[in-house]
Image (spheres, rainbow, N blue to C red):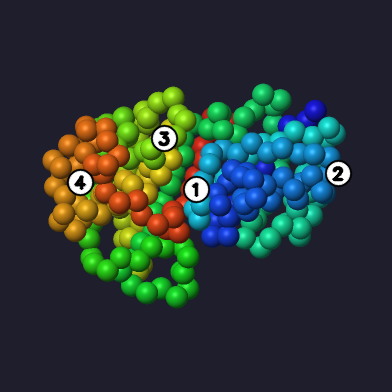
C-alpha cells in the first residue's frame, strides 16, 4: 500500500459538512467516490478535521491509501476535471505510511467573515449583521480567551469528545475592506466552537456583555451561558499546520 496526502479547498454551501453521512451530500463522500472511480479501486479518505454543514475550507488536508504508486500530477488533473466546481484539488503527494492528516496536525486556523453591508459578490461567504460592533472592545475580549484552555461553554452539546481542552495561541479581529474578520488559531477546536465564540464576542462588541461577563461565561463551563452560534456561511478553515512542511 502507498499513502498519499491530498491538499484541497472547498466551498461548503452545497454540502452537509466534510464527513460522510448516509443519504446526504458531503465533501468526503464526493471525493471518495471520484477517487474510487478514477483509480478503479475503493478509496477511503481521512480528513484533517470535520467542518460542519455550510462551512468552507480554503486549506484542507486528507490522506488515503492505494494499492500502487500514483502519477500524482495526472491524478490531480483528472480529479479536478471530474469533481464539482466547488471542490479544488491543489496537490497530491506521497507521505510516510504512518502519516496521518488529522492526528499529525499541530494547529488549525479559522476565520469568520461578517459585515453590516449588503455584499452581492460575497453572498454565501459572509454573515450580515445590522450594527457596527466595537472592534477594539472585541479584541480585548478575544485576548481574554487565550488565558483559558477549557472551552466547554462554547462546545456543541452531546458530542463524543474526550476533552474540551484547547490551547488557543491567537484570537483577533481585523477590518478588511467592507468586512470584519475574526481569526482564531488553536491546536484543536470543538464542534461549533468558533461560531459560538464569534457570537459571544459580538455580544461584547455591541455592549450586551462585559469583559468580566465573558470571563464568567468561560468559567461556568455551560454552553447555555454563551452567545448565539453564528451562521455557518461566514466560517472558513484557512490553515492546517504540520511539523512536516507540506
| Disc nearest the viewer among 3 and 2 | 3
The answer to whether 161 is drawn above or below residue 217 in the figure is above
Mark with earlier residue (3, 1): 1
Residue drawn at x 55%, y 49% is: 17
Mark with earlier residue (4, 1): 1
Give the spatial CA distance, label 4 vs label 1: 28 Å
Under tag 1, what secondary structure?
A: loop
Mark with earlier residue (4, 3): 4
Q: Which residue is mark 1?
A: 52
Q: Which residue is mark 3?
A: 158
Where residue 35 appears, as percent x and y from the top left, is: 76, 46
Q: Residues within 10 Å of mark 1 (few under 14, many from 20)?
A: some
| Disc nearest the viewer among 3 and 1 | 3
The answer to whether 77 is drawn above or below residue 179 in the figure is above
Where residue 85 appears, as percent x and y from the top left, is: 66, 63
Q: Which residue is mark 2?
A: 40
Give the spatial CA distance, label 3 vs label 1: 15 Å
Q: Are marks 4 and 3 in contact (CB under 8 Å)?
A: no
Mark with earlier residue (1, 2): 2
Under tag 4, what secondary structure?
A: helix
Q: Is residue 72 visible?
A: yes
Under tag 2, what secondary structure?
A: loop
Left or right placement of residue 220 versus residue 194 in this view: left
The answer to whether 70 is drawn above or below residue 83 in the figure is above
Give the spatial CA distance, label 1 vs label 2: 29 Å
Which of the labelled discs sits on residue 140, or is there none? 4
| Disc nearest the viewer among 4 and 3 | 3
Q: Are marks 1 and 2 in contact (CB under 8 Å)?
A: no
Mark with earlier residue (2, 4): 2
Q: Residues within 10 Å of mark 3 (few under 14, many from 20)?
A: few
Where residue 61 appears, as percent x and y from the top left, is: 60, 41
Point out the image quarter for the C terminus: top right
Amino acid at each position: 500500500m502507498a499513502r498519499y496526502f491530498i491538499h484541497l479547498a472547498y466551498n461548503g454551501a452545497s454540502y452537509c459538512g466534510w464527513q460522510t453521512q448516509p443519504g446526504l451530500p458531503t465533501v468526503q463522500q464526493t471525493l471518495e467516490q471520484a477517487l474510487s472511480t478514477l483509480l478503479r479501486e475503493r478509496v477511503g479518505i481521512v480528513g484533517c478535521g470535520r467542518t460542519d454543514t455550510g462551512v468552507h475550507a480554503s486549506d484542507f488536508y486528507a490522506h488515503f491509501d492505494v494499492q500502487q504508486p500514483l502519477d500524482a500530477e495526472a491524478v490531480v488533473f483528472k480529479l479536478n476535471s471530474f469533481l464539482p466546481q466547488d471542490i479544488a484539488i491543489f496537490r497530491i503527494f506521497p507521505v510516510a505510511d504512518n502519516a496521518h492528516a488529522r492526528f499529525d496536525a499541530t494547529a488549525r486556523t479559522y476565520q469568520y467573515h461578517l459585515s453590516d453591508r449588503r455584499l452581492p459578490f460575497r453572498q454565501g461567504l459572509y454573515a450580515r449583521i445590522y450594527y457596527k460592533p466595537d472592534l477594539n472592545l472585541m479584541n480585548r475580549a478575544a485576548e481574554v480567551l487565550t488565558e483559558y484552555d477549557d472551552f466547554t461553554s462554547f462546545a456543541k452539546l452531546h458530542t463524543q469528545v474526550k476533552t474540551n481542552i484547547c490551547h488557543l495561541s491567537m484570537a483577533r479581529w481585523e477590518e478588511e475592506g467592507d468586512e470584519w474578520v475574526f481569526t482564531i488559531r488553536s491546536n484543536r477546536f470543538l464542534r461549533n466552537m468558533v461560531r459560538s465564540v464569534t457570537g459571544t464576542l459580538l455580544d461584547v462588541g455591541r455592549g450586551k456583555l462585559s469583559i468580566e461577563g465573558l470571563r464568567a461565561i468561560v468559567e461556568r463551563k455551560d454552553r447555555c451561558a454563551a452567545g448565539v452560534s453564528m451562521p455557518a456561511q461566514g466560517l472558513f478553515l484557512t490553515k492546517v499546520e504540520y511539523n512536516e512542511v507540506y
